[in-house]
Amino acid sequence: MTSMEVAEIKTELLHASISLKKEENERTQKEDSDRMLKARRAIENYREEQRLIQAISDGWDD
């Protein structure tokens, strides 16, 4: 194996490593975004439920 072939293999390995790291980062960002969206939805649902409870309670107090 020539030094040129070794250098090409090293370059290919470096590119593969960079590509895998990039894919991992993108996957992590997507998972984080999904978690944040679920949390926001849960908070919105909780607040809506609290508003409905308050509205019902106010209706009973009249």
Image: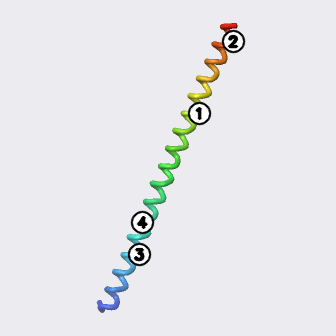
Three-letter code, disc 4: Leu
Quadrant of res 2: bottom left
Sort mark 1 into few (<14), some (14-19) or many (20+) by Cα contacts within 10 Å.
few
Relative horizontal placement of residue 23, taking residue 44 as reference (left or right) = left
Residues at badges 2 and 1 in contact (C-beta under 8 Å)?
no
To which residue does mark 1 refer?
44
Task: Establish if 21 lies above or below 31.
Answer: below
Residues at badges 1 and 4 in contact (C-beta under 8 Å)?
no
Residue 26 position within the rendered picture, expressed as x and y whole percent measured from the top left: 48, 59
Q: Residue at x 41, y 70 (%)?
A: 18
Q: Which badge, 3 or 1, is on the more N-terminal residue?
A: 3
To which residue does mark 2 refer?
59
Q: Identify which residue, 3 or 19, lies in the foreground.
A: 19
Q: Residue at x 51, y 44 (%)?
A: 36
Residue at mark 2 to residue at mark 3: CA–CA distance? 66 Å
Sort mark 3 into few (<14), some (14-19) or many (20+) by Cα contacts within 10 Å.
few
Three-letter code, disc 3: His
Element type at mark 3: helix
Q: Which badge, 2 or 1, is on the more N-terminal residue?
A: 1
To which residue does mark 4 refer?
20
